[in-house]
Amino acid sequence: MRETGMIKQEIKVKLSLECGRVLDKARIVFHTSGSRKGRIVWICHALTANSDPEDWWPEMVGPGKTLDTEKDFIICVNMLGSAYGSEGPARENPATGKPWLLDFPDVTIRDTVQSFIEVRKHLGIEKIDLLIGASNGGFDAIEWAVTEPNLFDRCLFLCTAPRISPFLGATVEAQRMALEADPSFREARDLSGGRNGLRCARAQALISYRCFKGFGLTQAEDDPDTLFAGRVASYERYQGEKLVRRGFDAYSYYCLCNALDSHNAGRGRGGVPKALQRIRARTTVAAVDTDLIFPPAEGRQWASWIPGARFVEITSDFGHDGFLLETAKLSALIL
């Protein structure tokens, strides 16, 4: 990760997890912009991103950008289970002095939200002007808006849903199967285990992140007479290798996949529609027209369960990844 203007910080907290286990000194890593002036904007990052949004959303976050690090007070917390600092399989298990790997407890979306609340309290924040969550970061944002409904003035939920769907669950299970098919994953000797499986899992995930048109625009063969189509194959392998080179490990990825399965904002609250009625923030739900994971029809339905929410459909050639790429359209929703 490159050096940016966001400031990296960390705290240690006690977390009682939904699975019944307790993390006595869970490390929570987060970034903030320097100034406490202006809007308080909390960003919930997606699956393999980190707590520095300037790193993975550079067209949106930074000096003079839509989310201005010199005018807004921006916070982003690295989710539980991630490879990028917060407590997870890559961190040291205090009982053994070695990385947790497969011994790390099962964590849920609600557990991650509890870690956010601990950071909020640490920073002394009692009101958040804008909460933004995209993809599974949107899982965190929706859960939090239901948990602490009076905390937020505005919410923007991008390419997400209040409960994991069977389609997304199927893609997640296929990725777990890829990890498990790598013999070194179950051996769990160190963080290098399962790297081939991780490459495969990432390549599988990318198919659902894009769409037919997007692959056609960027990965079509230049030579109309090519004997074998290899450009997109090379791209898929590159994306798998890229995640490994970024320092992500298979155990963190596995943990995050399991956490996705836990997402259900309606659990214990009388169902999703009733849970979403708790939200008090002025809410925008945005979906991308080519998103295979979170189709607009689904978003339009659950947006209607949030009091006063508006639904926006964004046109993009790039499927789910439109939330990263359609910056002009997203900026219009934020300003």
Image: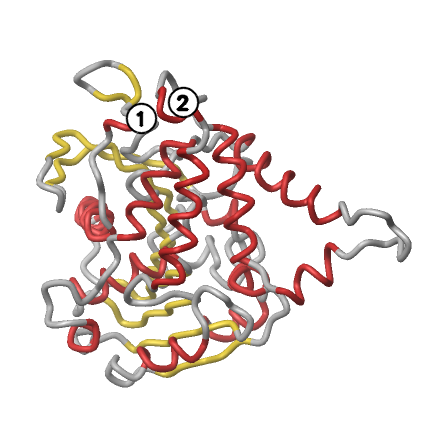
The residue singled out by tag 1 in the image is: 101
Q: Residue at x 10, y 63 (%)?
A: 268
Asked if disc 2 and disc 1 are in contact, CB closer than 8 Å, the reply is: yes
Q: Which residue is drawn at 42% across and 32% down?
A: 250
Tag 1: residue type?
Answer: Leu
The residue singled out by tag 2 in the image is: 191
**Res. 83 mark:** none
Image position, residue 253 (x, y; %): 39, 38
Depicted 264 relative to depicted 63: above or below: below
Q: Is residue 148 visible?
A: no
Locate residue 59: give its quadrant. Answer: bottom right
205 left or right, relative to 173: right
Q: Is residue 26 visible?
A: yes
Q: Residue at x 31, y 66 (%)?
A: 129
29 left or right, relative to 280: right
Q: Residue at x 21, y 14 (%)?
A: 96
Q: Which of marks 2 and 1 is nearer the N terminus?
A: 1
Q: Nearer the viewer, residue 136 or 325?
A: 136
215 left or right, relative to 125: right
Tag 2: residue type?
Answer: Leu
Depicted 131 relative to depicted 309: above or below: above
Image position, residue 81 (x, y; %): 31, 38
Q: Which element type, helix, strand or loop, lies under badge 2?
A: loop
Q: Which element type, helix, strand or loop, lies under badge 1?
A: helix
Q: Nearer the viewer, residue 326 or 214?
A: 214
Give the Cα distance between marks 2 and 1: 7 Å
Q: Counting other residues with Cα less than 10 Å from the Cα at mark 1, is it few (<14), some (14-19), or many (20 or more)?
A: many
Name the residue at the top extreme.
Answer: 97
Depicted 315 relative to depicted 215: above or below: below
Image position, residue 66 (x, y; %): 51, 64
23 left or right, relative to 116: left
Depicted 134 relative to depicted 234: above or below: below
